[in-house]
Amino acid sequence: MNTCNKKQTEFYYGIGKEIVKEGIFERFPDLIPAVGECYWREDGQHKKMLLVGESNYFDDKDILDSDFRDAEMWYKAEDAKLIPEAKKVLVNNWKGQYPTFDRVYEVMDEVLSAANIEHNAYLLQEAAFYNYFLRPAYNDGKHKGFIPQDIDRKVSGVALSGIIDRLNPDLVIFLSKNAYDEFLKYVRRNSLQYGESLIQFVYHPGNHFSWYNANGKAKFEQLLKEYWISK
């Protein structure tokens, strides 16, 4: 049994050793989930929620310092250049206050406040967050979103399934339809089941138009009310 704290890198060691030789999070320790102090509420006022984003983004200035455009090197090469030192704060899953996450935190705050639940001002402390794809998307100014290769699909599916097994969330909400669709394909291919864990998606909060769509903010709010707040 893993006795490490779920904020420690070691808590995730061993996941994916069958495809990434040293283990996925031994290779990418900067990409472990952010798990808030109140992910598990001792008072039971809300359940355990894992939010899942899509990916980080690197651009032209990162090409010399990282092999992120070569999927095989990224996951397997011993001499690969991975996450540059200057990018480590950016890729960390502890997401602070900026427009994309402000929209998510705003809804969480409204739902908790309406239920008269005292909570942290930094709303991520009430949940957990993880980006689905471990290889950064290439922001070349022409394409939006992550375009996965087969190895991305396999590694990302193995990584998240391992995280779910260890964090045991009651509710998993993808903040990306693309990532959600890819994970469902992985689940079906591997005949996985997650018992009572509800896995759902909403449209990405970074897209103003889709966030204010029925499958964006409104759906996120409804999921929190129905499945996150304890009855």
Image (spheres, rainbow, N blue to C red):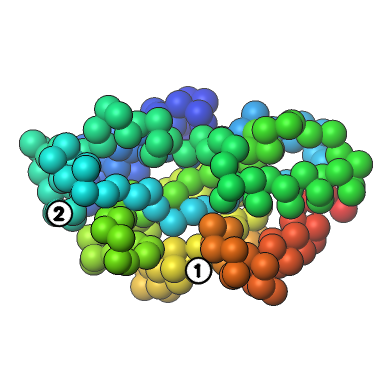
Name the residue at 39% across, 39% down. Answer: 91
**Is 147 located above or below residue 13 in the figure?**
below
Q: Which residue is mark 1?
A: 177
Measured from the top left, where is residue 77 in percent x and y? 10, 43
Name the residue at 38% across, 63% down. Answer: 145
Q: Amino acid at mark 1?
A: Lys
Q: Where, by quadrant of the figure, is residue 30 drawn?
A: top left
Q: Which residue is mark 2?
A: 70
Measured from the top left, where is residue 47 in percent x and y? 73, 46
The numbered mark at residue 37 is: none
Q: Secondary structure at mark 2?
A: loop
**Is 13 located above or below residue 51 in the figure?**
above
Q: Secondary structure at mark 1?
A: helix
Q: Quick check: 98 left or right of 48?
A: left
Measured from the top left, where is residue 28 in percent x and y? 30, 37
Q: Quick check: 189 left or right of 217?
A: left
Nearer-the-camera pick, 66 or 196: 66
**Is 1 located above or below residue 136 in the figure?**
above
Q: CA distance from mark 2 to mark 1?
A: 24 Å
Is residue 199 in view?
no
Q: Amino acid at mark 2?
A: Asp
